[in-house]
Image (cartoon, coloured by chain):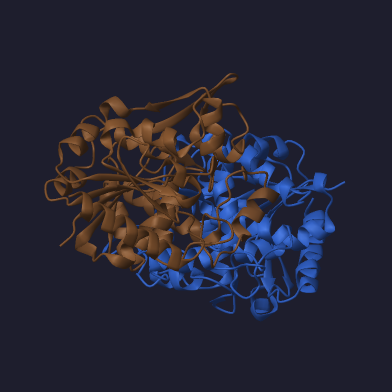
Chain colours: A blue, B brown
């Protein structure tokens, strides 16, 4: 039996996570999700990466938008706009209910982990999704013109500002989710999904003790490159790398994760790097346009993990 | 020029208020609204009577439900139900935006009066609606089985519990809205709309100094009976009166307001009482099914007020 820890952020990572969920039983995989993107907005506790994975695994994700729900209406937002409210972060009528439900649970003293479990179950998800920590961590984006909260950078400013670095506010006091540490005791593989290394995966890796726990775990660590032919499939990863004066290449992503990696999955477009990197590499089709693509890449990654054990 | 202070609660009062707004220019009437029904729900500041009048004057009220908006959808509530959230107080997708907008304004330190003004203006309302106070007052309903917050009694329990009395929590420390006191300095008439005397009008009358200010104002005070032929047009007024061992009659409503009243408007069904009550009385059609009914009653009331000056 496999015991996979899958580390993921939002859209790109959630695609592979869906593929993994189709191959693995609920007791064979734990999804550990970045919460550095979380923020309070309109009085609501919003957790974009948890929500994207939740909607993806529940079969509710909006494929056109890449966020939110497929069966969405926008009457709340339209009316809030008419009333002069903040509308830069778009919340659909159904999506809003999830944020209100989470906010009420947290206000009642329920942990983020338990709130995530309850929401997952209510949406019929059998696999377990856990926030990286029950403690608040907030990703701050540094730019030449000042520091921005992540969603202000990502959504409100549409990633336009030049990035000079990141801070994960609160991380020194944040404990890794105990469910993640417990899972590592019996893990057979660790998969870093093709999410943004800097803002989706680094918050997890910077939680006190978590990187060391991953390194100490005998299971192999395999990352899937989010960079394909010098481009990010989705989001600002390549732009960030250029601004951080790192080559926007799969090789630079592998180097970023460093000695944590035992294996690295390259896209076919980057096949020239195969064998030239420190960790073991394989080449696969990492661009996942269809469910079949997601399942095929998941199978390839799982076989790679097994081969590295 | 007329200067009318119109005191109102929810649905019944709002019908006459709409009639008054059609006859009077924005500088001829101030609508003073009960806020004892207000409550916090799902983290939102909800003001049912303010909202009913706001939607009514904006032409957005739902005529079938008697609350909320006409152009409403329910995807938020449906999804919240699926997530196990509280659904006894139904919030439409568009209605929700008003509550979020108000909650954000109050959280930012804006007063209830200013928040109400901003929302009114955003919805195109030219007449001024003010909460009875900027301070919190909460109507508590006493029953043989304990005390209920008003909306728990009214909506969640559908007025089923027997009422033994009311408390207006916080009222001793609540100041009447200064806009109401200022309006009284030049008022030519005070109209108590056909709202529930106990839970819609009494909270205003019990604000420290407000009843005395109304009595001291030289303008006549006229109430429209919310009881017609021993029945309330809408809501639990008659049921409450029976439970409070008060006859469920228009005469008992007039007696309840006591020496505050200079005039009282009876329905045709109660014409037998004409001339038998302490204040001056007139008989009119007080059941307002159409906009024409509302405008006709408003005109009758305004003429009555003028005659009493």
Image position of A241 with respect to A21: above or below: below
Front-lying residue, A221 or A111: A111
Q: Residue at x 24, y 33 (%)?
A: B211
Image position of A147 with respect to B239: above or below: below
Q: Quadrant of residue B274?
A: top left
Q: Position of residue A175 (x, y in %)?
A: 53, 35
Q: Is residue A261 visible?
A: no
Q: Residue at x 40, y 32 (%)?
A: B138
Q: Is residue A15 visible?
A: yes
Q: Residue at x 57, y 69 (%)?
A: A251
Q: Position of residue A145 (x, y in %)?
A: 26, 64
Left or right: residue B270 versus residue B309 is right
Tell me how many marks there are.
0
Q: Quadrant of residue A52?
A: bottom right
Of all residues shown, which one is farthest toward the left? B185
Left or right: residue A128 versus residue B180 is right
Q: Position of residue A117 (x, y in %)?
A: 68, 42
Q: Position of residue B108 (x, y in %)?
A: 30, 48
């Amino acid at each position: 039996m496999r015991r996979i820890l899958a580390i993921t952020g939002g859209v790109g990572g959630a695609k592979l996570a869906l593929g993994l969920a189709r191959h693995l039983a609920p007791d064979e995989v734990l999804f550990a999700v970045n919460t550095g993107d979380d923020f309070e907005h309109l009085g609501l506790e919003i957790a974009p990466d948890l929500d994207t994975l939740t909607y993806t695994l529940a079969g509710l994700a909006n494929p056109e938008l890449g966020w939110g729900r497929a069966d969405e209406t926008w009457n709340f937002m339209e009316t809030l706009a008419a009333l002069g409210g903040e509308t830069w972060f778009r919340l659909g009528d159904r999506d809003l209910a999830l944020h209100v439900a989470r906010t009420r649970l947290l206000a009642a003293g329920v942990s983020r982990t338990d709130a995530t479990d309850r929401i997952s179950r209510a949406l019929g998800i059998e696999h377990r999704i856990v926030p990286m920590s029950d403690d608040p961590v907030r990703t701050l984006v540094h730019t030449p013109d000042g520091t921005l909260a992540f969603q202000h950078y990502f959504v409100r400013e549409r990633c336009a500002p030049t990035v000079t670095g990141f801070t994960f506010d609160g991380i020194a006091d944040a404990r890794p989710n105990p469910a993640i540490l417990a899972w590592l005791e019996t893990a057979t593989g660790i998969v870093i999904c093709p999410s943004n290394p800097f803002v989706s995966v680094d918050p997890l890796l910077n939680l006190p003790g978590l990187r060391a726990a991953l390194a100490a775990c005998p299971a192999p660590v395999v990352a899937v490159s989010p960079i394909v032919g010098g481009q990010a499939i989705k989001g600002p990863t390549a732009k960030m790398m250029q601004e951080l004066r790192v080559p926007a290449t799969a090789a630079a992503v592998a180097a970023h994760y460093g000695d944590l990696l035992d294996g690295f999955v390259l896209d076919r477009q980057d096949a020239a790097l195969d064998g030239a990197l420190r960790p073991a590499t394989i080449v696969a089709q990492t661009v996942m346009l269809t469910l079949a693509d997601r399942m095929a890449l998941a199978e390839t990654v799982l076989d790679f993990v097994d081969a590295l054990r």
